[in-house]
Amino acid sequence: MSYDDLGECPWSMNWNYDGSLLGATTKGKKMHILDPRKQGSAMVAPCHEGSKSQRLTWIGNSEQILTQGWSAYMERQYAVWDPRDLTKPLTLKKLDNNNQQANLHYDDDTKTVFILNKGHPQAQMFFMHKTGGDNGTPTLQLIDSYKGEDNAQGWYFLPKRNVDFMSNELNRALRHNGKII
């Protein structure tokens, strides 16, 4: 599988829930939706205006896309997109003023979004809900944040069978700081 029309190295790539589409963000501030059964991009749209790297993840089996990037004023923001209409996001809101590169992880069981900062000891957890009912606008509500002692190089989520639900764990992740996990 080759996608030459991306034109540059992608910053983030993620498969949708059933593996029928692949989403990618590139340095050209564009989001590409790719169909693995066809050559070329199925859809291309502008993403965030900022020049720093952007991240993309699919929101479970809802067929919506969550992106994290920066505004033109270097404010970190998130957007929720409907892949059937990429002309404008369903939601575009400021997240914070943190300038760290982040990775996104969405847990469909608990509707939780994890924003994991690379090179920084902090991780944030958000609950994704729709304001105005089931057909409303998707928004993120901060649940909690975790701050470790050392800067994190990466985060690795364990399968759900390793989670202890009886002690109120939602997920279990391993944090890599360059020396130990």
Image (cartoon, rainbow, N blue to C red):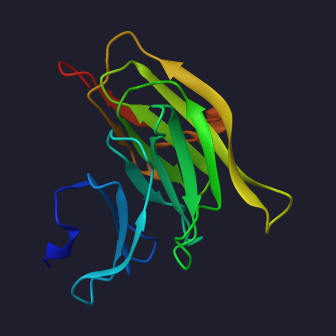
Q: Nearer the viewer, residue 72 or 113?
A: 72
Vertical arrangement, residue 123 with respect to residue 129, above or below: above
In the rendered image, the residue lying farthest to the right is 132
Q: Quadrant of the N terminus?
A: bottom left
In the rendered image, the residue lying farthest to the top is 149
| Picture residue at 35% right of the left edge, 54% below the top | 29
For residue 83, side relative to residue 13 (left or right): right
Q: Position of residue 105 (x, y in %)?
A: 45, 47
In the rendered image, the residue lying farthest to the front is 72
Vertical arrangement, residue 19 with respect to residue 23, above or below: below
| Picture residue at 47% right of the left edge, 52% below the top | 67
Q: Position of residue 30 (x, y in %)?
A: 35, 60
For residue 51, side relative to residue 10 (left or right): right
Q: Is residue 3 in sight in this rendering?
A: no
Quarter-wise, where is residue 144 in the image?
Answer: top right
Q: Nearer the viewer, residue 20 or 99?
A: 99
Q: Position of residue 49 (x, y in %)?
A: 43, 47
Count every numbered label the image shows and give the total: 0
| Picture residue at 43% right of the left edge, 45% below the top | 104
Q: Is residue 170 in sight in this rendering?
A: yes
Quarter-wise, where is residue 94 in the image?
Answer: top right
Q: Nearer the viewer, residue 39 or 14?
A: 39
Vertical arrangement, residue 176 with respect to residue 121, above or below: below
| Picture residue at 45% right of the left edge, 50% below the top | 48
Q: Position of residue 52 (x, y in %)?
A: 33, 38
Q: Quadrant of the C terminus?
A: top left
For residue 102, side relative to residue 137 (left or right): left
